[in-house]
Image (cartoon, rainbow, N blue to C red):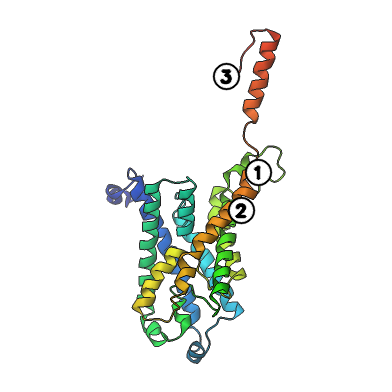
Amino acid sequence: MGLRYEKHFERFSCTNLPLLRKLLSELLGMFAFVLIASSTVASVTFNKDSSDVFTNSTYDSSEILYINVGIAFGYTIGLYTCIENVGYLNLALTVLFWCFGKMKWNDMVVYLSAQFIGAMLAEACIYGLYCDEIEQFKDNPMTSLIFSSSGNSDPFMLAAFEQFLKTMVFTIGVMAVIDEHKDKQEDYPLNTIKPSKSFEPLMIGLVVFMVGIAFSHYARFYFNPLQDLSGLIFVAVASLRISMMWLIGQLIVPLVGCFIGALIYISVIENNHQKPVVESTREGEELKNVLDDGSTGNLPNQ
């Protein structure tokens, strides 16, 4: 017996429209991620005492830990929502995988469009929910952190370098988690180090958490270009304070860090995997032995 709602929804199914299915999946995943991440920052910011919000422009260690837990689990939930996709809810990773030939051009466009729309919808929900508080505390730089990352230091290079390190380590961690060749190594004592597909989002969320708590002093919290771009639109709408110079740190530096991290992982780890040629070598040896013996025994299947 089918579920009661199936007959009402099956007419709207996009099973035979793979691009639409990818767009909807990535959009919902990005929406869930940004909604949880931004709501966590907003909850911490506006749960402070009013005088503290006006006078203090930093978070203490417990608040940073709380925020990064929310961001990491939000990312995990978002990835579980769109588990069949390879956009990974991040512009830098999406562009990287397209450049490396892991996805087609039309897939990349679909993923990036879905990420931007999903982030915009989530930011709109946050803005509507906290519009009164945002208006009250709009002169405080902490309020802009709800929507977008920001440099916490006057020396721009320090914040940009931290953002670079953050995205580089994040990319290395993601590529280590999704590396399919780890399970194909012969006589490798750690051949079970790669998690199963069902645990990949959880492990990537753990990577986000560890990177977040390790690098959250100069460049705050987010390192997702499209999330930042959508957030900047609402920063402008709300007339919040933010350094325009930091636009480079939000949009360009994560791309550079992502590509450098990928190149490091490929050159140091992925390029040194054993090549899966063991079976073909054995078949060649068997064929050579048969020919040398001059027998007409059973040849290996071609």
What type is the residue that disc 2 sits on?
A: Ile
The mark that comes first in sequence, 2 or 3, is: 2
Mark 1 to mark 3 CA distance (whole Å):
30 Å
Q: SS class of the residue under badge 1?
A: helix
Mark 2 to mark 1 CA distance (whole Å):
12 Å
Q: Give left or right: position of 287 versus 205.
A: right
What residue is rendered at 45% in x and 64% in y? Answer: 225
In what quadrant of the picture does the N terminus appear? top left
Mark 3 sits on what residue? 301
In what quadrant of the picture does the C terminus appear? top right
Mark 1 sits on what residue? 272
Q: Give left or right: position of 299 versus 1.
A: right
Q: Give left or right: position of 188 versus 156.
A: right
Tell me where residue 184 sits by quadrant: top right
Q: Tell me if residue 45 can be seen.
A: yes
The mark that comes first in sequence, 2 or 1, is: 2
The crowding category of the residue bearing disc 3, from other C-alpha atoms within 10 Å (few below 14, some 14 to 19, many at least 20), is few
What residue is rendered at 67% in x and 16% in y? Answer: 288
What type is the residue that disc 1 sits on?
A: Asn
Q: Nearer the viewer, residue 122 or 293?
A: 293
The mark that comes first in sequence, 1 or 3, is: 1
Q: SS class of the residue under badge 2?
A: helix
Q: SS class of the residue under badge 3?
A: loop
Determine which of the numbered discs, if any, sits on residue 264 in the image: 2
